[in-house]
Amino acid sequence: MKRIQIINGPNLNLLGKREPSVYGNLSFEAYLEELKKNFPGVELFYFQSNVEGELVNKLHEVGFEYDGIVINAGAYTHTSIAIADAIRSITTPVVEVHISNVFKRESYRHHSYLSEACKGCIVGFGLDSYRLAIESFL
Ligand code: DQA
């Protein structure tokens, strides 16, 4: 069975409550249950942290063993060389996802430090971005 780790960064623990016009009304925990039903043949693991170094630690922990990592680093996408370097340091392929279409938003969201270290990026499909990212590993 394939093992895939989902990693969510800062403020994504508030999905469902946070800016629902941008990010929707569903909590990630509720969405995760749907995802698990969609992929009965995949072992899905979920980790969320608001702390940059904890995201780096999780990448190191799973990044030599799992079959894929789906990361939404939230605002660290636009600031974190440390997370980009962690992605480059591991062997598991990483797909970057964003719920919103960051290119339709403020210009400071247009640049990602992570993208060039990732296998690919899925942006702007709402929570469905995560499902599409998982599909890419199968
Ligand atoms: C986000 C986009 C980021 O710019 C923002 O800081 C987030 C969420 C998204 O999923 O659309 O926290 O990564």
Image (cartoon, rainbow, N blue to C red):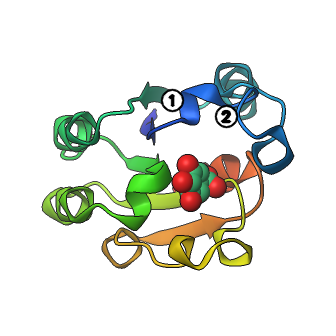
**Left or right, residue 87 beside residue 105:** left
- Disc 2 marks which residue? 39
- Within 10 Å of disc 2 (Cα), the crowding (few <14, some 14-19, many 20+) is some
Pointer 1 residue Cβ closer than 8 Å to ligand 1? no
Asked if residue 138 shows in the view, the reply is no
Residue 130 position in % (x across, y down): 64, 48
Q: Quadrant of ligand 1?
A: bottom right
Tell me the quarter of the picture where residue 93 sits.
bottom left
Kind of element beneath mark 1: strand
Query: Which residue occupies the foreground of this view, 133 or 27?
Result: 27
Residue 42 position in % (x across, y down): 55, 33
Pointer 2 residue Cβ closer than 8 Å to ligand 1? no
Q: Is residue 116 above or below residue 18?
A: below
Q: Residue at x 40, y 49 (%)?
A: 68
Kind of element beneath mark 2: loop
Asked if residue 60 shows in the view, the reply is yes
Q: Residue at x 77, y 59 (%)?
A: 125
Q: Residue at x 68, y 31 (%)?
A: 15
- Disc 1 marks which residue? 44
Query: Where residue 102 is drawn, which disc sits there?
Result: none
Please state which amino acid type lies under the numbered disc 2: Phe
Q: Is residue 102 above or below residue 95?
A: below
Count of labels in the image: 2
Residue 120 position in % (x across, y down): 49, 72
Kindly report the distance in space between the C-alpha atoms of the residues bearing marks 2 and 1. Answer: 8 Å
Q: Is residue 78 above or below residue 83?
A: below
Labelled pair 2, 1 in contact (Cβ < 8 Å): yes
Q: Residue at x 68, y 47 (%)?
A: 131
Q: Nearer the viewer, mark 2 or mark 1?
A: 1
Nearer-N-terminus badge (2/1): 2
Query: Which residue occupies the foreground of this view, 12 or 96?
Result: 12
Tell me the quarter of the picture where residue 88 sits.
bottom left
